[in-house]
Image: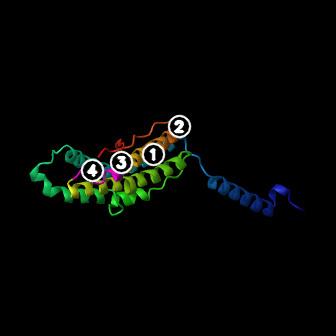
Amino acid sequence: MTPPWYRRRGWFVGGAAAVVVAATVLTDLPQHASKAVQASEDTSIVKEINTDVKGCAFALNESLTIHRDLVDHRVKAKDRPLIPGLLRDDQVACSFANSDIFNLSNVEVTGSGASRYLQAMVGTITTWATSDAVVAIEAVQKSWAARSATSGEAALARAGKKLSHDRALAESELRTAERLLSASLPSLVLPAVGPQPG
C-alpha cells in the first residue's frame, strides 16, 4: 500500500531542501541599516576625513600667517632663517607625500543614502588640499623668496578663490548628506579662506 503523501521520503527531502533555499535567499538579501546606524557610520567617516585633512589645514593657516607678516613687515630677524623650511613643510603637509592626505584620497564611503554626497565631498576636500592649498603655499613661497608681498600675488588671489569655492562645495555636499540622513554630522575643519590680498 502506498503511504500518504506526507509520509513519502521524496516529498520530505524536497520540502527540506526548499526550506533551506528559502532561508539562504532571505539571509542573503541586502539588509538596510536604520538611519540612526547610517548616521553613526557616516559620523565616523567625517571624523576620519577631518583627522586626515587637519594637518594640511594647520599648514595652510601657518603659510598665510607668514604671508600676512611679510605684508605687514612683522617678520622678526631671528625667524627669517626658519621660514623657508616651515613653508616647505607646509607644502608637504598638503601633498600626497603626507600619509594623512594619501589616506584621505582613499576614503571609501558606502552603505547609506548619503554615500554619494560624502564620497563627492572626499574628492572635493582632496582637491582643496592637494591643489588649492598647495598652490596658495607655493605663492607664499614665491613672495618670501622675493621678499615682496606683490610677488606671487595673482597666484595667491586665484588660490584664495579656489579654496573658498571648494570649501563651500564640500560644505554643501555635507549639508545634502545630512538632509538625506535626517541627522547632524560633524563640521568640517577646513578654515574659511577667501581671496588673499597681496
Circle 3 residues within 10 Å: few <14, some 14–19, many ≥20: some
Label 1 SS: helix
Q: Secondary structure at mark 2?
A: helix
The residue nearer to you, when weighing 81 against 106, is 81
As for residue 151 lying within the magenta part, the answer is yes
Apparent side of residue 79 relative to residue 154 in the rendered image (left or right): left
Residue at screen point 22% across, 58% down? 145
Q: Nearer the viewer, mark 1 or mark 3?
A: 3
Q: Are marks 1 and 3 in contact (CB under 8 Å)?
A: no
Give the mark, 4 or 3, whose residue is nearer the N terminus: 4
Q: CA distance from mark 1 to mark 4?
A: 30 Å
> Label 1, on which residue?
170
Nearer to us: label 4 or label 3: 4
Which range of residues does the magenta coloring cover? 148-156
* Dot in front, 2 or 3: 3
Instruction: Point out the frontmost of discs 4 and 2.
Output: 4
Which numbered circle lies on residue 179?
2
Residue on which the image places disc 4: 150
Question: Which one is earlier in the sequence, the residue at label 1 or at label 4?
Answer: 4
Whether residues under marks 2 and 3 lie with C-beta atoms below 8 angstroms apart, the answer is no
Residue 52 position, x and y percent, is 35, 53
For disc 3, the marked residue is 157
Question: Residue 187 location in percent, x, y?
Answer: 39, 40
Earlier-in-chain disc, 1 versus 3: 3
- Labels 4 and 3 touching (C-beta < 8 A): no
